[in-house]
Structure formats: C-alpha cells, structure tokens
Amino acid sequence: MVLPRTYDSQNCSVARSLEVVGDRWTMLVIRTAFEGVRRFDDYQDALGIARNVLTDRLTRLCDEGILRKVPYQERPDRYEYRLTRKGVELWPAMMVLMRWGDRHYAPAGPPVIVAHAGCGGVLGDDLSCDACGKRLQPDEVETRPGPGAGL
C-alpha cells in the first residue's frame, strides 16, 4: 500500500508535521540553517542540492513560517533565510534524531559532536550538558568533528 503525500484523513500531529518537514531535503535544509547557513548559494554548496529543489524547499519553509526571507542586498535583490521561533522549536527534534542516528548508523562514532559553548561539555540525550547539567538551547552550542567525521 502506498501512502498518500498528505494525511488529511488522519487526525494525528505526527502525520501533520510530516506534511511539512517529512522529506530528506527539508530536514537537511533545516539542519543547515541550524549550522548558521543563511544564503541560497551557501545552502546549495553545503547540501549539493539542485537549485529547483532548494527553491521549492525554502519557499515551503517560508510559507510554513519555519524560515523567514530577509533582504540583505538591493540591485539585484538578494535574501537570507533565517529560522523563526517556530523553526528554532525544531532543534530538540533535530538533536534527538541526530543522537538516534549516532547510536544506530554511525559505527565509527558520531560524525559531529555538539558541545556546550559555555563549558565544553557534550550534549546528552536529554539535551543537557553532560558536564554542567544545563539544559541547552541552539545558541548555546557549538559543533566539532566527531570520531566518525572522516568517513
């Protein structure tokens, strides 16, 4: 049985959320936004994504209020894509998904370590710093290569 592209008949928040963020490129665009990328060409370079696919995903994320388009240049008009509050709220889900992937699909160890910028401790499964115990937010972390980075 093939699932439809939308889940209108399901009264389920997971299904409704998947309508917005449930494809590979959308999640990777959001991940890249958390890494600090803001400009179209930088997204394309970071992801190796086709221009038309990237345009579609950025437009959809803006329409959904996850990103907002902010002008940074005139003549020609150029824009940055910045996470909104709604977009930032996806960070815990992104981190839990990353940690799950690290456990099950990174045999050489995590490719990326998310660390507390304040003390250097590592992000734990509960999204707290393993050194100081602080519950971490996206603006309080930094990334560094992990043991699986070179693979």
Image (cartoon, rainbow, N blue to C red):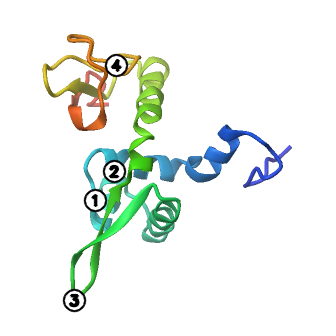
Q: Which mark is residue 38?
A: 1
> Which residue of the protein is positioned furthest toward the right in this rendering?
1
Q: From mark 2 to mark 3, how far is it between C-alphas?
A: 25 Å
Q: Quadrant of residue 137?
A: top left
Q: Amino acid at mark 3?
A: Arg
Query: What's the residue type where badge 2 is placed?
Result: Ala
Residue density around tag 3, few if under 14, some if 14–19, many if 20 or more, within 10 Å: few
Q: Earlier in the sequence, mark 4 or mark 2?
A: 2
Give the label, 1 or 4, closer to the camera: 1
Label 4 near label 1: C-beta < 8 Å? no
The residue located at (49%, 52%) in the rendering is: 25
Q: Which residue bears the numbered disc 3?
A: 75
Measure how far apart labels 3 and 4 are at the Cα level.
Answer: 46 Å
x and y percent of residue 108 in the render?
Answer: 35, 19
How packed mark 2 is, by other alpha carbons closer than 10 Å (few <14, some 14-19, many 20 or more), is: some
Dot 1 crowding, Cα within 10 Å, few <14, some 14–19, many 20+: some
Q: CA distance from mark 4 to mark 2?
A: 24 Å
Sequence-wise, the earlier of marks 1 and 3 is 1
Residue 4 x, y percent position in the rendering = 78, 52
Q: Which residue is mark 2?
A: 33
Please tell me whether mark 2 sits on a helix, a strand or a loop: helix
Q: Residues within 10 Å of mark 4 (few under 14, many from 20)?
A: some
Instruction: Assign the N terminus to one quadrant of the image.
Output: top right
| In contact (CB < 8 Å): disc 1 and disc 2 | yes
Q: Is residue 103 left or right of residue 17?
A: left
Task: Say which of 34 and 86 sits in front.
Answer: 86
